[in-house]
Amino acid sequence: MVNINISNSALTWLIVLAIWDLFWRGLALWRAVKRGDKPWFVVMLIINSVGILPILYLLFTEPKTKKKN
């Protein structure tokens, strides 16, 4: 069995980073699905960029709006 020693502060930062990434990835994936951006969805699902790629996607794409008829 492998014994891994990690400090409490390092563990705290790891948890904060995981929550940060989950939040931004979730928002970006939601928008990609609503817009029908399948390639973006796959890329953001596979590549772990600590929230950077999802934030860029959210900044440079507009949410799809419903057309008023």
Image: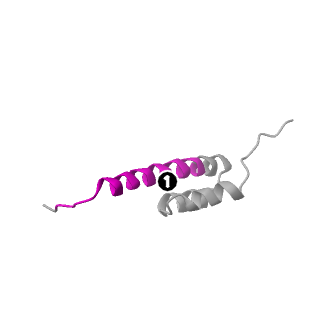
Q: Is residue 7 magenta?
A: yes
Measured from the top left, where is residue 6 in percent x and y?
27, 59
Residue 47 drawn at (x, y percent): 49, 64
**In the displayed structure, does residue 36 sit left or right of residue 62?**
left
Q: Residue at x 28, y 57 (%)?
A: 7
Extreme residue in the left direction: 1
The residue that appears at 30% across and 53% down in the rendered structure is 8
Residue 24 image position (x, y, % from top left): 55, 51
Above or below residue 40? Residue 33 is: above
Judge by depth and name the residue closer to the eye, 69 or 10.
10
Q: Residue at x 43, y 53 (%)?
A: 18
Q: Position of residue 64 (x, y in %)?
A: 73, 46
Q: Horizontally, is 46 left or right of 60 in the view?
A: left
User: Which residue type carries mark 1?
Assistant: Asp
Identify the image quadrant of residue 14: bottom left
Query: Looking at the image, which residue sits at the far right?
Result: 69
Q: Residue at x 45, y 54 (%)?
A: 17
Q: Which residue is mark 1?
A: 21
Answer above or below: position of 66 versus 26: above
Q: Main secondary structure of the magenta part?
A: helix
For the N terminus, the quadrant is: bottom left
User: What segment carries the magenta color?
Assistant: 3-29
The crowding category of the residue bearing disc 1, from other C-alpha atoms within 10 Å (few below 14, some 14 to 19, many at least 20), is some
Q: Quadrant of the C terminus?
A: top right
